[in-house]
Image (tube, rainbow, N blue to C red):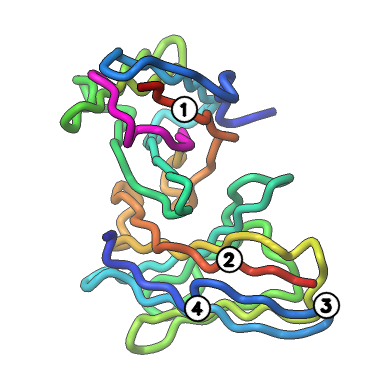
Amino acid sequence: DSGVTQTPKHLITATGQRVTLRCSPRSGDLSVYWYQQSLDQGLQFLIQYYNGEERAKGNILERFSAQQFPDLHSELNLSSLELGDSALYFCASSVGNPQETQYFGPGTRLLVL
Amino acid sequence: AQKITQTQPGMFVQEKEAVTLDCTYDTSDPSYGLFWYKQPSSGEMIFLIYQGSYDQQNATEGRYSLNFQKARKSANLVISASQLGDSAMYFCAMREGRDDKIIFGKGTRLHILP
């Protein structure tokens, strides 16, 4: 158990819908990262928050957004969902120092029908 | 160009044998970090081992060791005395400079045979 929690574990929804994925980092970690794992694209970095502020952005679509709250939990919002958004979404956390290891949560498996 | 290359899509190894999973990387930044993660069929990503570019010695964590050859830009994972529970997908990954994000390779699926 990495100490990072993600809810829900599974999510099935329809095209055009909006969903919210939630992540709680390990105790003491200030940075939260979101990654998407799909069959065709592999594991891709989406976005990073550090202590409530956006720090880095990767291959995140405009239909997706994220935020980190004062209690350091983070939410990833996916809207206008398409079939191709079906993937495993991981949250990871670290202390925030670039040399620190990122510990991954169990992931949320999203299926868009 | 691929930043992380894992040339072995799949491997079959007999239980108790040692395994080497290949990884080469591409960066011009002198400061970087290399990671290996394990992803079992249940889906979670498990951190295994880390090697910093300035580390003088190869990293080791229990049965895992990282064969770091800087000049060749190679960071192979060695698993000694493989076990059935080692069957999983293994990802090599890199972080460059002060960039926080991790770039992953496509992975190697390891099958340990009884």
Q: Earlier in the sequence, mark 3 or mark 2?
A: 3
Query: How far separated are the C-alphas under marks 1 and 3?
Result: 35 Å
Dot 4 falls on a residue whose secondary structure is loop
Q: Is residue B95 left or right of A98 when viewed as pictured?
A: right
Query: How far separated are the C-alphas under marks 3 and 4?
Result: 18 Å
Chain on which label 3 sits: A
Quarter of the C terminus of chain B within the rendering: top left
Amino acid carrying mark 3 in the image: Thr
Query: How far separated are the C-alphas under marks 3 and 2?
Result: 15 Å
Disc 4 crowd rating (10 Å Cα; few below 14, some 14-19, many 20+) is some
**Residue A104: x and y, percent?**
39, 58
In this view, B31 is above or below A76: above
* Residue at figure coordinates x 59%, y 83% from the top left: A20
Q: Is residue B43 left or right of B58 when viewed as pictured?
A: right
* Residue at figure coordinates x 43%, y 76% from the top left: A23
**Residue A79: x and y, percent?**
74, 81
Contact, mark 1 vs mark 2 (Cβ under 8 Å): no
Dot 1 falls on a residue whose secondary structure is strand
User: Same chain for the residues at labels 1 and 2, yes or no?
Assistant: no
Front-lying residue, B11 or B75: B11
Chain on which label 4 sits: A
Amino acid carrying mark 1 in the image: Leu
Q: Which mark is residue B110?
A: 1
Contact, mark 3 vs mark 4 (Cβ under 8 Å): no
Residue highlighted by disc 3:
A15
Q: Earlier in the sequence, mark 3 or mark 4?
A: 4
**Residue A83: x and y, percent?**
81, 66
Query: How far separated are the C-alphas under marks 4 and 1?
Result: 29 Å
